[in-house]
Amino acid sequence: MSDTSISTLKNHLPEMVHLAEQGEDIQITRHGKPVAVLVSLERYQQAFAARKGVFHAWQRWRKLHPEAEGFNDAEQAAMYERTREPYADKANSWD
């Protein structure tokens, strides 16, 4: 992942978008601190596509491996609600 400042990004946006399209993640900084990441549409969709979050991946795994030890359905539902609430107003969530 390469770093670039907002001002550099502003002045070189076409080149940065091209790099992202080629698979390079660009970390955007403001006053030297990371604030965002520019990624290709493909990587974005992989990371944030509907029902592809960590929680849903875990649910799918549990269905494939019912013999595995772990949380029962009630415990899973309680964990989902407990961890989801602090992030309800955020773009990233378990969903």
Image (cartoon, grey):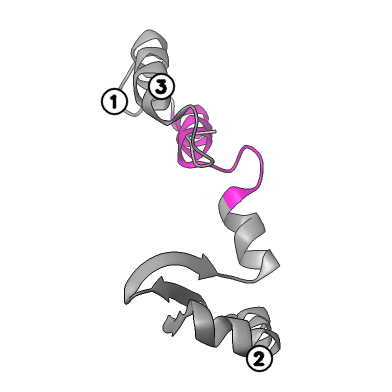
Q: How crowded is mark 3: few (under 14 residues within 10 Å), some or many (20 or more)?
A: few
The secondary element bearing badge 3 is classed as: helix
- Separation (CA) of disc 1 from disc 2: 49 Å
Residue 19 visible here? no
Q: In this view, does 23 lie above or below 76?
A: below
Q: Name the residue under label 2.
A: 15
- Separation (CA) of disc 3 from disc 1: 26 Å
The percent position of residue 82, horizontal first and vertical second, equals 34, 19
The percent position of residue 44, horizontal first and vertical second, equals 62, 60
Q: Mark 3 points at which residue?
A: 85
Q: What residue type is labelled 1?
A: Glu
Q: Name the residue under label 1.
A: 69
Question: Residue at the location (68% across, 80% down)?
Answer: 21
Q: Is residue 37 above or below residue 76?
A: below
- What range is drawn magenta here? 48-65
Q: Earlier in the sequence, mark 3 or mark 1?
A: 1
Q: Residues within 10 Å of mark 2 (few under 14, many from 20)?
A: few
User: Which quarter of the figure is the N terminus placed in?
Assistant: bottom left
